[in-house]
Image: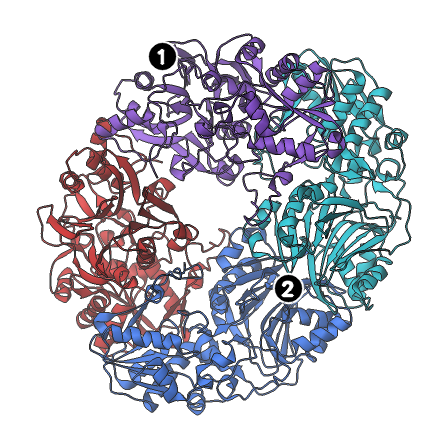
Chain colours: A purple, B red, C blue, D cyan
Amino acid sequence: MHDVLKGDTLQEECGVFGVWGTPNAPQLTLYGLYALQHRGQESAGMAVVEEQGLRFVRGMGLVSEVFGQDIHTLSGCSSIGHVRYSTTGGNTPQNIQPLVVSYRQGQLALAHNGNIVNARALRRQLEDEGSVFQSSLDTEVIAHLIAHHPQESLTESIRASLGQVQGAYALVFLTTKQLVGVRDAHGIRPLVLGELDGAYLLASETCALDAVGADFVREVNPGEMVVIDDDGVQAIQVLEPQPMRLCVFEHIYFARPDSQFNGWNVHAVRKELGRALARTYPVEADLVTGVPDSSISAAAGYAEEAGLPFEMGLVKNRYIGRTFIQPSQTQRDFSVKVKLNPLKRLIEGKRVVLVDDSIVRGTTSRRIVRMLREAGATEVHVRISSPPYRYACHYGIDTSSPGELIASKCDVEGIRELIEADSLAYLTVEGLFDVMGSDAYCTACFDGDYPVDVNLATGKRGLEVY
Amino acid sequence: MHDVLKGDTLQEECGVFGVWGTPNAPQLTLYGLYALQHRGQESAGMAVVEEQGLRFVRGMGLVSEVFGQDIHTLSGCSSIGHVRYSTTGGNTPQNIQPLVVSYRQGQLALAHNGNIVNARALRRQLEDEGSVFQSSLDTEVIAHLIAHHPQESLTESIRASLGQVQGAYALVFLTTKQLVGVRDAHGIRPLVLGELDGAYLLASETCALDAVGADFVREVNPGEMVVIDDDGVQAIQVLEPQPMRLCVFEHIYFARPDSQFNGWNVHAVRKELGRALARTYPVEADLVTGVPDSSISAAAGYAEEAGLPFEMGLVKNRYIGRTFIQPSQTQRDFSVKVKLNPLKRLIEGKRVVLVDDSIVRGTTSRRIVRMLREAGATEVHVRISSPPYRYACHYGIDTSSPGELIASKCDVEGIRELIEADSLAYLTVEGLFDVMGSDAYCTACFDGDYPVDVNLATGKRGLEVY
Amino acid sequence: MHDVLKGDTLQEECGVFGVWGTPNAPQLTLYGLYALQHRGQESAGMAVVEEQGLRFVRGMGLVSEVFGQDIHTLSGCSSIGHVRYSTTGGNTPQNIQPLVVSYRQGQLALAHNGNIVNARALRRQLEDEGSVFQSSLDTEVIAHLIAHHPQESLTESIRASLGQVQGAYALVFLTTKQLVGVRDAHGIRPLVLGELDGAYLLASETCALDAVGADFVREVNPGEMVVIDDDGVQAIQVLEPQPMRLCVFEHIYFARPDSQFNGWNVHAVRKELGRALARTYPVEADLVTGVPDSSISAAAGYAEEAGLPFEMGLVKNRYIGRTFIQPSQTQRDFSVKVKLNPLKRLIEGKRVVLVDDSIVRGTTSRRIVRMLREAGATEVHVRISSPPYRYACHYGIDTSSPGELIASKCDVEGIRELIEADSLAYLTVEGLFDVMGSDAYCTACFDGDYPVDVNLATGKRGLEVY
Amino acid sequence: MHDVLKGDTLQEECGVFGVWGTPNAPQLTLYGLYALQHRGQESAGMAVVEEQGLRFVRGMGLVSEVFGQDIHTLSGCSSIGHVRYSTTGGNTPQNIQPLVVSYRQGQLALAHNGNIVNARALRRQLEDEGSVFQSSLDTEVIAHLIAHHPQESLTESIRASLGQVQGAYALVFLTTKQLVGVRDAHGIRPLVLGELDGAYLLASETCALDAVGADFVREVNPGEMVVIDDDGVQAIQVLEPQPMRLCVFEHIYFARPDSQFNGWNVHAVRKELGRALARTYPVEADLVTGVPDSSISAAAGYAEEAGLPFEMGLVKNRYIGRTFIQPSQTQRDFSVKVKLNPLKRLIEGKRVVLVDDSIVRGTTSRRIVRMLREAGATEVHVRISSPPYRYACHYGIDTSSPGELIASKCDVEGIRELIEADSLAYLTVEGLFDVMGSDAYCTACFDGDYPVDVNLATGKRGLEVY
C-alpha cells in the first residue's frame, strides 16, 4: 500500500504535538512535526504562547515549506502543532490546524487527530443556538461546545463537551495557562506523554519524542485527560474508560517503524506479522521482496521465517514527492516506472514472494505484479500482512469510497485473479491478535466491529462546501 | 498627505464591491476591486456563488497578486469583493475579508468598510453567550449577531442585528439567494448602486462602476438596505434615517478623482476647495504646485483662481510601492528623494505656493518644504485644502495615534514653525461647507462633532492579539 | 502614447547607472535604478566590486522584485546597474544585464542602453574567429571585441573596440580597478556624470543623480569616454566627435519630467511643445486634457497658451502594472476602462482638446477619442506634441514593426479619420527645432535622416533564437 | 556515508541525459532526470530542439521545482538534460547546465559529468586568444575549444577539442542536427546507451533508461563517441582507448541500487561487498544494521554471510530535504535525531555490527556509534564496505578538502578510537577487486593511483569568483 496510484491508498489524517514550559518550544514543535510528517503532508501549523497571547503560523504544504521563513519569529515556552492530510475537496486554507479561537475565557488553540462521528448533528444543534462556523473541521465543533459550557475551568468545559462527542480523537489544547491532551474513550487514536528536562510533551507517536531528545513517559489512557501547566502534569479520567481499541493500522501501516504503541515497537510488530504470514501461508519460492517503504519490515520477517533470501526487488525513487510533475494525458504512462523500478537482475527467472501490508482497490497491486513479471519473475506470490480491508473507517482514516474496497466485493480468489498473482494470502484477525498477544485493537475495517456507534457518521469530515 | 513617511498619513481601511446576476461576476468583481485598490492595498478577497455554494479566494497583497492564479478557477453569476488596509498589528491572514461563514441559515459572506464603535462590548456579550471568534474583525461581530437573530429571512436578521450596532459602515452580504447592501444611519461610509445590462452592482465608489462599464443608479441612502436578487432590487429603510453625514475626507483625500458622492465629482470638489483657499488666503507668489497625486486638483484650482502658473514642482516615482526596499539604518536617508523629486528648474529663485490636502504629524510637510528650499525656492507658502485635523477618526480611518496629530497640539502658527513654511493657511469648516453648498458631512476630525457616540469606541479595530 | 494597448507604444530599452568609490554603492545603485525604472521594467541587475572580485544579482521583474532579498548581501564601494525593457521573444533570463565576463585581463561587467547596428556582422566575424555567445545581446558583442583587443589597458581596448562599432550607445563598464562610461559619437543615447561627496556617478538621466542626492556635473559628450577610479575622473575623446544628435524622444516621451538633457528640463520642453502647438494649431474649445502621465506637461502648456482650462479629463488607475490580470477572450473588453476613466462631469457637453505626445498605430488614440465621446464630449480635437512618427528607430527604441506605423501609411487627414477625431494636428520638425532652439537631435523617426548608417541594421536586437 | 552532517559526505557532481528522435522528448528527459536526481540536487536544466532552434529551461533546485511550470511549454523530439550538485561557493545560477551557446556552426548545448583536470590551463590559453567566459564551469572550456576548431563537422571539432582535454567526463552535446555522447579515455564517469521504439537515449545510469521504459543497449566505451541522428547511431573511437577504469564509488555509493555498470547490478555488488566483509572480518554479535539508505545492501550481505539477523536499527526521516530548517546556534543540537532515530527496542542490550560504505571525516560515524550506545547497544562493531578513503578525487567527486580525510591522517586503529567503535574493519583494494572479479576501476581515492595525470589539477572546479 503506497502512493504510486492516487486513490489506491489509505491516508492517516493528522499528527499532533504539544510542549509546555521549556525555552525553544517552537523549535521543539518544529522538530516534532518533522518527525510526524508521515501522518500528514497537506498542511501544517503551530500555535505558541507569546507574551501578548497566542500567535500562530499555518500554511499549506510540508513542515519545511510552512515554517521556513517564520519559525524564527516565534518564541515562547509552550506551543502545539499539527500536520494534516486532507481528503479531496477539503484541502483548503481555512481547514489548516491548529484552530485558534477567542471565546469568553480568552484564547484557545486546538489540534485534532481523528474523527467525530456525530459532528454534523452537533454542528446543526450549535447553529440552531446561533453559532457561526468558518471551516468544515469537526475540530471547530469541539471549540464551539467548549464555548457553550461556561464551567469555571477549561478542563471542566472540555470534560462536559466531550460528553456530547462520539468518535475517535487525540486532542491537544493550548491556552496561555495550560496544555491539555485528551484521548477518546477507546483510545482509537494514539497519544503519548513525554518528558524533557522537567518539561512535558504530548505527541501522536513516540518517534516525535525521540526527535527532540525527550523521554517517553507513558501513553495517555483511553478517556484520560492530561493537564500540563507550570505545576507539572495532572491526569484526570474524564470519560468512562472503555477497553483499549487502538487503531490496528497504526501498527500495520501508518506509524513510523521506530514508534511504539501498547508496549510494542512498530517495526517489531510488522516483522512478527511477516513471520506469522510465512508460517501460515508458506510457498515454494526463490526470494522475498516487499513494497518500499512500509512493507519492508513484514517482508524481512517473512523471509527470515521462511528461510528465503530477502531482497530489494523494487527500488523507490526518493525524490518523487507532492510536487511530482504528472505526465500529460496524451502519452503513455511512464509515471509508475519513474516511482518504482524492479531490480531485474534479482527478479529474472525467480519465483517471488511479494509482501505488502494491505490491498485497497487492487489496481496498484496488479501493476506491481505485472512489473515483476515483466522483469522476469516466473511466479509472483502475494502475501498481505493484515486481513482483507472490507469496511470504511469512520475514525480518521481516509479510505477510498467503500464501494471501491476490493475486499468488500471479492473473495480472496477473486482478488487474486484481479491482481494477476499466482497465489494470494492474507492474515486473519485471529492471526493478528495472536501476534499482538492481545485484542486491544480496533479492527472495524476488517470485521465491521465498530467500537463507537457510526450510525451518526457522515463518512467524510467535509461537512460543508467551502 | 501621502506615503513618503510611514505613520504620517491617513489610511482608508476598505473598499467593497458586489454584483448579482450576470455572467462573469468574478471578472467584474476583479475589475471593480482594481478600481478600488486605492482604498486598501494590504489584502484582497472575493466570494462567489458557485453551484455547490459559496467559494472564496483571499490573500495578502494587491488585487493582482491575490487573484493572479486563481481568478480563472472562479465562476458564477454573483459575488462580492473587498480590499483592505490594515492598521499595524492587525494585518494578519485571518483578518482578510470577505468573511465567509456557515450558520443556521446556510452560508453567508460579508464585506465591510467602516468601524463598529461598540464592537468590543458586543463581542463580550456574544462570547458570554458562547460565541467563538476567529479574527479581530468587527465584521465577525456582525456575523455572530445575525446568527443570533433567528428571524425568518436574512434581511430581517440583518435589520435586527444592525439595531444593536453603533458605528459607520458600508456592508455587503452575499448568500446563494441574494446580495444585500446596507449603509449606516448617517451614511458616513459611502455605498453606491449601479446597473449593467439588467444586473445590479454595489460599490464603495462610482469609479468601480465605470471600470466595469456599469451605469450609476444612485447612492444607497443613510440607514437603507438594498436587497438584490433574481427579481431585481428592493430598497428598505432598515434604520431610522439620520441627516446625511458622509465622511468629508472621501472628497478631500480618499476617493478617486473620477468618483462622485452627494452629487459632486471628487476632482471638481477638490478644485473648488483650492479656489476657495486662493480667495481666502491669497499670497504673492510665482507659481503653485501640489503634492502628487492627491493634491493636484486643489493646487490647479488655487492656481486658476489666483491667476498663477500651476506647475509640476514635484515629480513622484511611480514605481515605489509596497515592496520598496528600505535603506538600512546606518546610512543617510535617500528614501524621500527616491520617492519625490523637486523640479529644480522650475523652483529655482521662485516664490512657491505648495498646496496639500492635510497635515497629520507635520514631518512630511517639513521635508517637502525643505526639499523645495534646497531646490532654490525663495519662499514656500503652504495652503491646506481642509481645516486642521485635530480629532481621531472612529469611523474607519486610521489616523496616527491622536497624540501625534500636530493640530491637536499646536495652533496654525505653531505648525507653520514646525514645518518651516513662510506662511501657512487652512480652510475653515465653514469655508468647506460653503464650497460644498451643504453641511451633509461628518467633520468630526476637524471639530470633534461625532455623529455617532464614541464613548464605547476602542480606538483601534484590533480587539485581540492574534 | 501609453500602455493601454500592448503593441501601440514606444519602448525605451534600457537605463544604466554606475558609481565608484563610496560606501553603500549597492544601495546607491538600487535607488538610481528605482529612479530609472521607467526606462525598463522587464529585468534588472547590478554588479558590485566585492573583496573577492565582481559579484552580481540579476533577475526578471521590477527593481523591487529583483533585489528584494539579495540587496543586503551585496557590499562594496563601486557598482553598476541596469534596467531593461525587452522586445517580444527576447525577454529571457540570459539577456539580463549587466553582463559579467571573465577574459584575459580579469573580470569585466558591462551595461548598455542603445543598439549596435552592425552587431550581426561583428558577431559573425567574431564567431568565425572562434567566439562563443551565450545571449542575443549586442552588449555581448562588445565584450568579445574588447577581449580580442589585447591592448595594455581596458580603456585602450574599449577605444579600439568601439572603432569597429556602428550604432547608438551609452555604455558603462566596471572592473575591480575602474568605472568607465562611453557615449556614441552622436550622443544619441544619453549619459550624465554626477558627483556625491567626492565620489563620481554615471546615469542615463539626471533624475537618478537627484534620487541619491548627487550633484549633476555635466553630460558625457558625444564620443567621449569618462574613466573613474580612485584618482578621480579623466575624460578622453575616444571617437571623432560628431554634432550632438540626442534622441528627441527622450524629451518628448521617454525621460522623466524632472530630468534634463542638453541644458533643458524635460517637463519644461514638453510644456513649450504644447505652447507651440497651441500657437500653430489653435481650435475653438472648452477645455484641454492630456493622456496621463506622459502628455500632462504638453497639455498644460497648450492650455496656458490657448487660455483654456486645463483639466484632468482622464483618470489613470495607478495599480495596473505588469501583473494586470487580462480578461479572458470570451467576454467583452473592460480592460481599457479599468486602466483609464474619463471624468464625465468635466467632459459632458464640452469641446475637448486632447493632447498626446505621439501616435504609433492609432488604435489607442481611437479608443480614447471614443471614450471621450461616450463621456459626452461634443467635439474632440487631437493635438500631437511631435511630428508624425514615420520611420523605425534603429538606435534602441522598440517601435512596433514599421509596417504598423500609421503615419508611414496615411497622411494626417487619413489618421484623423482613423482615430475618429474632429481635427488632428502635429508639430513639424521645424516647429520642434524652434522650441528646442537647436537641431542637436536625432529626428530619424520623423524624417528618416539617420545619423548612423543603418544599412547594416537588423531591425531587432534579437540576433538568435534562445 | 550520508547527509546527516554537512561536509562529512562525498558528493557526485552531476547526471546527464539525452534523447534523439521521439515525440515527448522533454517529458522523457524530465523522467530521466527524476531518476538521476540522486546525482545532483542543487540545479537542473534541459535544452530542447524546437522548431526555431534550441530552447532551454534551467534553474536552481530539484527537478520538480525547476520544471514545474515550464515543462509543458517545451516541445520537440530531441533534448538533453542535466542535474548538478555544486561545491560550496560555486552554486550560482550562471553555472547551471546544460550550457547553451551559439558559435560559428550554430547553436550547441552541452551537459557534463566529471572534471577536466587541465581546465585552468586551457582557459588561460583561450583567454589569451580572446575568449570571454561567463561561468566557472569547465564545461564552458570545452565549448570554447570546439568553437576554436573550425572542422567541417561538430564531431570532428569535438574529437580535436578532446585531444587537448585531460580529465574524466561523460559529455552529451545537442544541436538541431544530432545528439552526441562521449566518454573519457578511461571511462571514469559512466555513460550508457538505450533504445526506445527506435529512438536512442544516453544517460549516466541505466535506472534512467528504466524510468522511461527504454531498453539498455550497452555502455559507451572508454574514449568512444556515439553520434545519434535521424539515421540512427554511429560509434566512433575518438580517443585512444585505455583500459576501463570506472569510478569504483559508482558501485559503492553513488549509483542507484537498480543501475548496472560493467555488467554488474549495483545492489548485487554492494551485497557481495558486505559478504566479503563478513568473511574477512567476522565478529561475535547479535545483529547487523546499516546506515540508510546507501549501506542497506552491504549490511544485508554481511548479515546473510554471517548468519546474523539483519535489522532496521536506524530509521531515517524521509521528509528531511534540502529545505530542512536548521536549529539556531544557541540551542542544543536536535538535528541529528530528527534525521536518524535508532530503534531502541532492537538495539537494547545487543552487540551490533554497523555496516557503512565509507568514512570521510569520521564525525558522522562517531555520532551514529554514540547514538547506538545511547540506545543500549553493548558493543558497536563498524564494518566499511570499501577501503580507507585517503586521496582526494580529481575526477568529479566532491570530497571534503583532502586534509580532512580522516584516513589520510590516521591508521585504522586511530580511526576506530576517533569514532569510538569497539572494532573497525575495512575491505582492502584486493578484496574489492576479488568481489568485482576485475580491476577495471579507478581506485585513486584508496591508493593514489590516478589514471589521468593530476599535476595540472586545480582541486576544485570553481575557477573564478562569480
**Viewer-closest of A87 and C40:** A87
Report the residue marked by disc 2. Answer: C99
Image quadrant where residue D258 sits: top right
Residue A144: image location, x then y, percent: 29, 27
| Horizontal side of residue D146 vs C362, given as left or right | right
Image quadrant where residue D415 sits: top right
* Residue at screen point 56% across, 45% down: A325
Residue B249: image location, x then y, percent: 22, 57
Report the residue marked by disc 1. Answer: A238
Up-down relation of residue C291 to residue A182 (above or below): below
Q: Give amino acid for label 2.
A: Leu
**Viewer-closest of D231 and A10:** D231
Q: Mark 1 near mark 2, Cβ–Cβ under 8 Å?
A: no
Residue B115: image location, x then y, percent: 23, 45
Which type of secondary structure does the marked residue at label 2 adopt?
A: strand
| Horizontal side of residue A330 vs D134, given as left or right | left
Image quadrant where residue A394 sits: top left
Which type of secondary structure does the marked residue at label 1 adopt?
A: loop
| Horizontal side of residue D458 vs C238, given as left or right | right
Q: How many neighbours does mark 1 have within 10 angstroms: few (below 14), some (14-19), or many (20 or more)?
A: many
* Residue at screen point 54% across, 48% down: A329
